[in-house]
Image: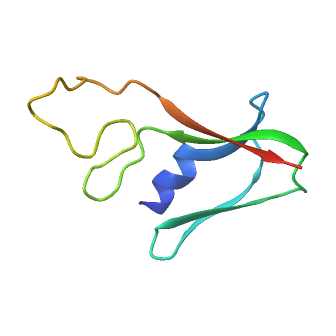
Amino acid sequence: MDQALAQRVIHVTTESGQRIQGQAALQDEELQWTFVPEAPWPRGAHRLMVETTIEDLAGNNIGKPFEVDLFNDVPGSLTNATVKLPFEIR
């Protein structure tokens, strides 16, 4: 992953969509994304938001299959603009 691209397309929000401010970084040869919030985590539901435009050096991205069976129908375009991964702070 590219550091600059990752900083633009990966972020954390509250359940209501408010963005959590903090420092994000890629580590472990750009295989691991870390995030440290500026303020203590607020309790409750949150989401890790990743835009489907993020891709690795080979052009793979989370908005389409990495491997495609050419004998099956393949969607012609990306279906989601953002992948949302929910998590909760207790």
- Color style of the picture: rainbow
Residue drawn where x is 51% and y is 54% of the image = 6
* Residue 68 sits above or below residue 28 on the image: above
Closer-to-camera residue (19/66): 66
Instruction: Residue 1: name its quadrant.
Output: bottom left
Closer-to-camera residue (51/90): 90
Judge left or right: residue 89 versus residue 28: right
Number of numbered discs on residues: 0
Closer-to-camera residue (71/35): 71
Instruction: Residue 26: name its quadrant.
Output: bottom right
Residue drawn where x is 23% and y is 23% of the image = 76
Q: Position of residue 24 (x, y in %)?
A: 65, 60
* Residue 38 sits above or below residue 52 on the image: below
Closer-to-camera residue (82/73): 73
Q: Position of residue 7 (x, y in %)?
A: 56, 53
Residue drawn where x is 90% and y is 56% of the image = 40
Judge left or right: residue 48 versus residue 88: left
Residue drawn where x is 40% and y is 42% of the image = 62
Q: Position of residue 87 (x, y in %)?
A: 72, 44
Judge left or right: residue 10 versus residue 71: right
Instruction: Residue 49: name its quadrant.
Output: top right
